[in-house]
Image (tube, grey):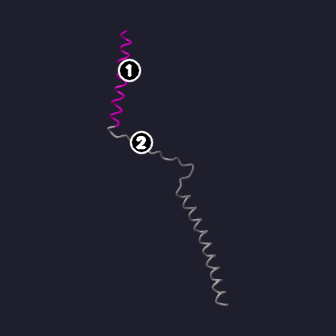
Amino acid sequence: MGLLATIKREERKLEQQVAKLQHELGRVRTAANALARPAGRELKRIKKRVLSAAAKTKISKAAKKRWAKVRAQAKKIAAA
């Protein structure tokens, strides 16, 4: 019976160590998460949207076409 009692005692001791290590692991994970996230006071950096050269050209041509239409109508009104 002495051997069984010794094994049970060792088992309880190991379970206590496991519980202590799990508690410490939880604290370390919490600290790591806190460090990984930016503080609430810091501003988030917004990623700037970038257009390709072809898209810029297409937008520019469309805008010039719209303004040409506006100017043409203004000339018609001024002539009338």
Q: Is residue 50 above or below residue 31?
A: above
Report the disc number at residue 70.
1
- Lower position in the chain sequence, tag 2 or tag 1: 2
Q: Quadrant of residue 9?
A: bottom right
Q: Mark 2 belongs to which amino acid?
A: Arg
Query: Pointers 2 and 1 in contact (CB under 8 A)?
Result: no
- At horizontal 65% and vertical 83% (from top left) the residue drawn is 8
- At horizontal 38% and vertical 11% (from top left) the residue drawn is 78
Which quarter of the rendered picture does the N terminus lie within?
bottom right
Q: How many marks?
A: 2
Q: Which residues are magenta?
A: 55-80
- At horizontal 35% and vertical 10% (from top left) the residue drawn is 79
Q: Mark 2 and mark 1: span between their CA atoms?
A: 30 Å
Q: Is residue 70 above or below residue 31?
A: above
Disc 2 is placed on an element classified as loop
- At horizontal 57% and vertical 65% (from top left) the residue drawn is 28
Please name the residue that numbered disc 2 is placed on: 49
Report the disc number at residue 27.
none
Q: Is residue 29 left or right of residue 80?
A: right
Q: Is residue 54 left or right of residue 25?
A: left
- Residue 26: percent from left, percent from top: 59, 65
- Residue 62: percent from left, percent from top: 35, 29
Q: Is residue 56 magenta?
A: yes
Q: Quadrant of residue 51?
A: top left
Q: Of residues 74 and 2, which is closer to you in this image?
A: 2
Q: Main secondary structure of the magenta part?
A: helix
- Residue 3: percent from left, percent from top: 64, 89
Which quarter of the rendered picture does the C terminus lie within?
top left
